[in-house]
Amino acid sequence: MATAAVSELQEMLTLPGDAVRQIQWRFADRFDLQMLVQSARGVARGTVARLVAAGERNTHEWTPGKNEMMEAFDRAGLTATFMEPEEGGFIVGPKNLALALSAFELAWVDAGAATASLAGFLALAPIHERGTPEQVSRYKSLSAPPQPGEDRKPWRGAFVLTEPIPYVGVDTGMLSGKVRLADWKEGEEPWLQVDKRGRFITNIAFANFVTAAVISDDPRIKGSCFVILEETDEGTFDHGTPTKKLVHQLSSTGDPIFNLKVPASRIVGGYTVKDGVIVPNWNHGEVIESVFRRTRVPVGLMTAAKLLSAVEPVIRYQRGRFRGAEGARPGTVRYEQGIQQREDALHRLVDVWATGEAATSLGLATARLFDDLDPIEKRKNAILTERGINGGRAELKALKESEQRAIELLSLEPDSARRQDLEADPLVQYVLMDSAANVLCPATKLWNTGHGANLLREAVSLMGGYGITEDCPGFLGNKWMDAQLEATYEGPEAVQRRQLTVTMTSEIFLAQFRAWTAEMRRIASDRPGTGACTLASAMQMWQWTLGHLQRATDPEGGKLYHGQRQGVTFVLADALCWLMASRCQILDVLELEARGPEDPVASEGLAGTVQFLSDLCHTQAAAAAGEVSRICAELVFGYNQHPSWDEEAHTNCFLASELEEYEETMPGISAMAVDVLGADGSHPQKAGPCAGCGGNSDFLRLQSKLMRCLSGARLAKDRAAETVSKVMIPEALDYPA
Ligand SMILES: Cc1cc2nc3c(=O)[nH]c(=O)nc-3n(C[C@H](O)[C@H](O)[C@H](O)COP(=O)(O)OP(=O)(O)OC[C@H]3O[C@@H](n4cnc5c(N)ncnc54)[C@H](O)[C@@H]3O)c2cc1C
């Protein structure tokens, strides 16, 4: 499939390097991000790797060693990633991709280190998203690392939402943290009394301030809000005891207790006073929504990084497995190839690698989408404010019209003049991006971490006993276990699935999904080796199934696609994530193929790299198709009652005596009849007559097509496995074991 413009070599000789990745992941023209990646990598493979190797994960306590890691983040500029240049940062504009890349590099070695780095930004995020200009300026400047020559320790923050059971966890609406009026003198700023206990709060051992979710316990304060609490405020700021975590031990986690008196100006985003009542400008739900929407993406990238980081250690282990044994002399297959002589070992590693590629592509595509969305969202707000619309129902109504325009846009030919008009409309751009982001963010968090954790187990198993020891190169055992936390915090799988079940059914998302399906077919006609056709068929099946389930009922007449029916909605959301990941993976390989030849480094051996990465796409598309087909078939058929052998249900069966008669006029019919009843009522030994598929023949047609689309997928996997068995790797891992 590679074009003649690239090198003649068809086999990938070395692991994909930075030049290839920068093109695939679209930051080849962002020098600031390339520098950030190098800085994060230096800390990860230096300070962080040494801490892990020295056993710092074996204690729950906050140690001088772990503190040294935070200081290394400051020195490397990582702590400044979130800040604007005037606040002490160095990246101009949106920072979603920057944060994602930084988390990716740190998690390549240890996800706890990545979490420790991100938690400070999570604390600042409510302020960044919804804070007043004064709040933004104060807390971001205080949290920025000191400039050269400046004698100051940066403030550290923590984000405090989760509370001791039975309050907030998945259900963020159930708050027990309370805010009351402490003091309100005529004409002066009111003072608040804040009473909040946290559970599992990251960064808490050393936090100087926290942003905490609380609900009013006072008729003079309306609803809920986020408040900023500082260590030196009047009252109790108890950092609490460390949580006895099994994971991410390089980050600090604990259960703090706060009972503090603070000015009302600490309400995130400010407040107004209406009829003597303090009304926060943003309730805690609105703040959480805008925060998690972005911060969940880097979490998904942590697991993706770990999957890709497993490739090199596993290859090295497999190849060296028999070296030193009597019969394995240099030059023999046993010596040179070790376990890589065996197809299963190679195929399983290909699965891990392909999943890591897809997860990274999905996560970084989502981060880039948020970078594009951020300025458009600001424009949307400005346009609507100009029209006198400030959020709420009026905004929804105003955007409805833009949604219809966006749907029209998706149906137009590429060169139509109307299309250009619609494309230039910022509100149309906004609704398109927003609806995609509403799906891609939870998809990244859910699929990368949940399915990623399963594949990390697979990676660990490829290292045999070594995999589950502390000595395992690449710390794979830690990475596997850590993935479960990535799947849990910032809202576990149920939260992501719940969001997907709503956002994936929006008219505008489904219109885009249809366009993406057509796009995959177009790609397939030029690049059949990517598995794009398989993916398009699976996408078609998913969309058909959603439509079917939205209309279908169970035998009792109950609606199948319904908020309460998670058995239907959640699994369909899972299926969608596979499709989204595979799509992003294919698009990234096409980008590499198109832009690689211009780059002096990436162009070397490009054809082989593109071939290999395409084979991984094909492998992943086939896995996605299998998953989607399994899930959809179970949902489409599984809610039909299976016929039984009773009088009523077997009326469609043949009687044995009837068949004998028919055989005279229709020779061969007996061979076709599967449900034949004997004269004494006896029947074949099975659950009942085969279930009819009335109304579902469309589905069977789609499924039959999809199965045929799998042609070539295993050939691609074989080719990828062959490359894995030959690709050169460095002599030793570049960070300690
Ligand atoms: C190491 C660590 C660090 C953390 N850091 C922070 C932090 O800095 N700040 C902070 O505020 N919080 C933090 N958390 C808390 C974390 O966000 C929560 O633990 C997480 O959101 C899950 O909530 P929960 O533990 O109450 O789980 P539960 O709500 O009890 O969930 C248990 C299970 O039930 C399922 N479930 C729950 N509700 C539903 C439903 N409606 N439908 C279907 N299934 C459902 C869940 O998917 C899950 O599988 C941290 C947690 C850990 C372990």
Image (cartoon, helix red, strand yellow):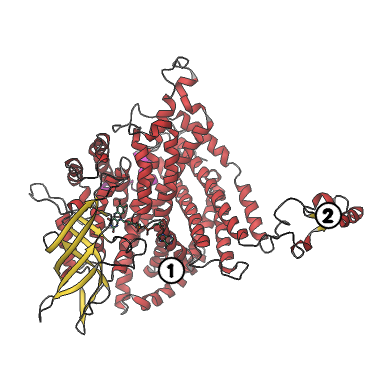
Amino acid type of disc 2? Gly
Name which residue lies at 48% across and 17% down. Answer: 332
Residue 417 seen in render: no
What residue is pinned by disc 1?
A: 422
Residue 453 pos. (x, y %): 41, 46
Question: In which image quadrant can residue 68 be found?
Answer: top left
Front-most of 508 and 551? 551
Name which residue lies at 84% across and 56% down. Answer: 680
Secondary structure type for disc 1:
helix
Q: Earlier in the sequence, mark 1 or mark 2?
A: 1
What residue is pinned by disc 2?
A: 678
User: Disc 1 or disc 2, which is closer to the eye?
Assistant: 2
The magenta span reads 18-33
Name which residue lies at 50% across and 64% down. Answer: 510
In the displayed structure, 368 sits above or below 476; it is: below
Residue 427 pos. (x, y %): 38, 70
Amino acid type of disc 1? Leu
Residue 390 seen in render: yes
Q: Quadrant of ligand 1?
A: bottom left
Residue 31 part of the magenta-drawn span: yes
